[in-house]
């Protein structure tokens, strides 16, 4: 029986994919932003044997929360236990277990267990956590099923990754900071980038940004995008787009600043996308398929990314 302020819940789903495949996807936390709709970013910062520590940024009831967890991996039993070390309010404590149960050679059942307690054992906070756990668990299990079944099939790979980069002249100490600042200060992109016509950026928590902007495509059309960005001064900005365009079911990305020899800094923009196959013909015409859609997305995103990179290079090399 649950104690006051404490809950234990279970969600489960049947998957038409081998248990080992499903377990590997749950273990690979670095891929969670591309698999689980609520997850924005995961940083695995410590691993020793079967134990690891991770920090997660994810949506909960429409808010982006971040917390640190310790995970215990048990690949032989197809289990992963987790326990939050630094919870995010209103959570006082949370943990649980992923359990993958084989159902023959090509099918499995996934059980996701949670136990949690609200700060101050407050009933309203407990109800908030209950809604978040239920909503996220259902979304994650549905996405895990879809991803595992796609991986077990022989169709098109579900995601596609590509990148562009420029080299900025100067040492890390000279130009890495200005380049990062240019990418981080997206609130100024309307003034600095010709393909950006409107920007709305909020940063209530340092390093966690909500960015909405209107960008112009080569054909003159304007597109509105909205992204959550997690910023790591002075080297990396990761983001996940929310409110996706008709041609995509996923768009995550990384801006990365790194040394490129003794007198150069390489700035890279990478994108990971998944095509919404149901909308290809409506957007691109009756003769288009997945290859044409990927080419279209690659060209559109790459054009704007390269423009941003080149302006960042110019800004860093020609600053006072």
Image (cartoon, rainbow, N blue to C red):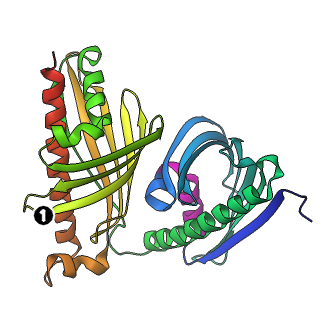
Q: In which quarter of the image is residue 260?
A: top left
**Magenta stretch?**
19-30
Task: Give the image location of residue 285, x and y in percent.
Answer: 14, 81
Q: Is residue 90 left or right of residue 18?
A: right
Q: Measured along the vertical axis of the image, is residue 211 above or below residue 38? A: above
Can residue 77 be spotted in the picture?
Answer: no
Residue 31's place in the image compared with 66, above or below, is: below
From this view, report whether residue 41 is shown above or below residue 192. Answer: below
Overall secondary structure of the magenta stretch?
Answer: helix
Query: Viewed as shown, does residue 291 lie left or right of 120?
Result: left
Helix, strand or loop at label 1? It is loop
Q: Which residue is drawn at 23% across and 15% down?
A: 262
- Using the rendered view, name the quadrant where residue 164 is placed: top left
Measuring from the top left, give residue 89's x and y in whole percent.
67, 46
Identify the residue at horizontal 37%, vertical 39% (top origin). 237
In the image, residue 82 above or below residue 170 = below
Along the viewing direction, whichever of 144 and 93 lies nearer the viewer: 93
Nearer-the-camera pick, 274 or 108: 274
Farthest residue in the bottom direction?
286
Residue 300: % across, % down: 16, 58
Residue that mark 1 sits on: 221
Looking at the rendered structure, the number of numbered marks drawn on it comes to: 1
Is residue 134 visible to us here?
Answer: yes
């Amino acid at each position: 029986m649950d104690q006051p302020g404490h809950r234990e819940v279970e969600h489960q789903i049947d998957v038409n994919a081998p248990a080992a495949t499903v377990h590997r996807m749950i273990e690979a936390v670095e891929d969670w932003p591309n698999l689980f709709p609520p997850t924005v970013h995961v940083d695995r910062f410590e691993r020793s044997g079967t134990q690891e520590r991770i920090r997660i940024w994810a949506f909960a009831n429409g808010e982006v929360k971040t917390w640190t967890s310790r995970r215990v991996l048990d690949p032989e039993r197809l289990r992963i236990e987790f326990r939050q070390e630094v919870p995010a309010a209103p959570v006082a404590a949370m943990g649980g277990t992923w359990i993958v149960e084989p159902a023959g050679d090509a099918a499995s059942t996934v059980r996701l267990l949670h136990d949690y307690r609200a700060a101050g054992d407050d009933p309203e906070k407990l109800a908030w956590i209950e809604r978040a756990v239920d909503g996220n668990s259902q979304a994650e299990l549905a996405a895990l099923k879809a991803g595992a079944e796609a991986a077990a099939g022989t169709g098109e790979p579900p995601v596609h990754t590509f990148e562009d980069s420029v080299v900025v002249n100067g040492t890390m100490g000279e130009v890495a900071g200005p380049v990062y600042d240019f990418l981080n200060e997206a609130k100024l992109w309307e003034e600095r980038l010709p393909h950006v016509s409107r920007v709305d950026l909020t940063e209530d928590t340092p390093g966690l940004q909500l960015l909405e902007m209107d960008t112009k495509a080569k054909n003159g059309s304007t597109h509105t995008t909205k992204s959550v960005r997690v910023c790591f001064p002075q080297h990396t900005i990761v983001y996940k787009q929310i409110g996706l365009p008709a041609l995509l079911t996923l768009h995550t990305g990384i801006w990365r600043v790194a040394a490129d020899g003794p007198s150069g800094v390489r700035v890279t923009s990478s994108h990971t996308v998944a095509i919404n196959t149901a909308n290809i013909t409506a957007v691109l015409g009756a003769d288009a398929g997945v290859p044409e859609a990927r080419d279209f997305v690659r060209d559109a995103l790459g054009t704007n990314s390269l423009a941003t990179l080149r302006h960042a290079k110019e800004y860093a090399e020609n600053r006072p």
